[in-house]
Image (cartoon, rainbow, N blue to C red):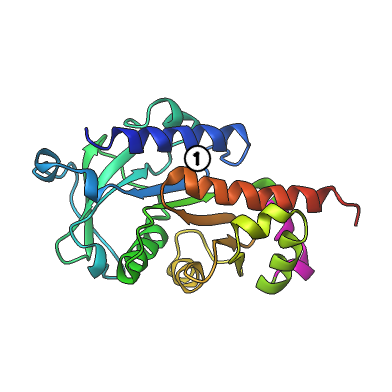
Amino acid sequence: MLFTDTINMCAEVAGLLWTKGWAERNGGNLVVNITGEVDENIRRLPPLMKPTALDTKMEQIAGWYFYCKGSGCRMRDLARKPMDNGCIIRIGPDGDTYETIACKPIKPTSELPSHLAIHNNLAASGSTRKATLHTHPTELVALSHIAELCDTERMNETLWSMIPETRLFCPKGVGFLAYADPGSKELAEGTLRMIGQHDAVIWEKHGVIAVGDDMMDAFDTVDILNKAAQIRCAIPR
């Protein structure tokens, strides 16, 4: 397959997430745009499952292809067998459905609406960024339990002040999104409002979502932010 390198990178990142303790059980998910890498053989593949309706029409990514972590699958398993624990989906021609066309007949991550909304927005803005990553970095989640930091401005002041690299590599900082149920429309809409203005978004008491040119780029953003959070957590309050 033409996109083998892209999927192998997803597997590498999945292994890093597991090693760092950011992907307990089936926690976290990833979605990467592979549209530019598919050939006619892939385009002709029939669906493995019935099309699934999307709550919001994604016109900008209609007909596009994505590799996604499978729902209920573990990152540690995706790291070893990415084709068994992920799936390739195709967005319908009107942007209001998606269908699984390759790998195993499994559904993609439950957070797919949030990820696709971001990809749709990226496409509309002309961005070349292709990857979205959601994970549960321990120290960043810990900071979201501290009431006085549960604010975009205060969270950024804290993270930027910990180590110079944080502001250097994450100049737009993080957006802070108050708790919303995983997979909810509220979570997707809130993330969409913030992600274009920031390098990543912290979901209160849940995790982080970041975008990148590729999956490793998105991982690097979270890694840098969590390093700052680790330093903050090590300072006696």
Tell me the residue that label 1 is attached to: 26
Image location (x, y in percent) of residue 99: 21, 51
Q: Is residue 208 above or below residue 56?
A: above
Picture layout, residue 165 above or below residue 13: below
Q: Quadrant of the N terminus?
A: top left
The front one of 109 and 150 is 150
Residue 234 can be seen in this image: yes
In the rendered image, which quarter is residue 189 located in? bottom left
Say which quadrant the C terminus sits in. bottom right
Report crowding for label 1: few under 14, some 14 to 19, many 20 or more residues within 10 A (C-alpha): some
Q: Main secondary structure of the magenta part?
A: helix
Q: Position of residue 161 (x, y in %)?
A: 77, 61
Label 1: which secondary element? loop
Residue extent of the magenta highlight: 140-150
Q: Is residue 27 above or below residue 57?
A: above
Of the pair 211 and 76, the residue shown nearer to us: 211
**Camera-side residue of 209 and 87:** 209
Residue at position x 57%, y 55% from top?
Answer: 208
Tell me, yes or no, if residue 28 can be seen here. no
Instruction: Give the amino acid at mark 1.
Output: Asn
Look at 20% across and 62% down and name the residue there: 62
Quadrant of the rendered image containing residue 171: bottom right
In the image, 179: left or right of 12?
A: right
Please determine whether, in this image, residue 104 is positioned above or below residue 204: above
Q: Nearer the viewer, residue 130 or 83?
A: 130
From the viewer's perspective, tell me whether residue 67 is left or right of residue 219.
Answer: left
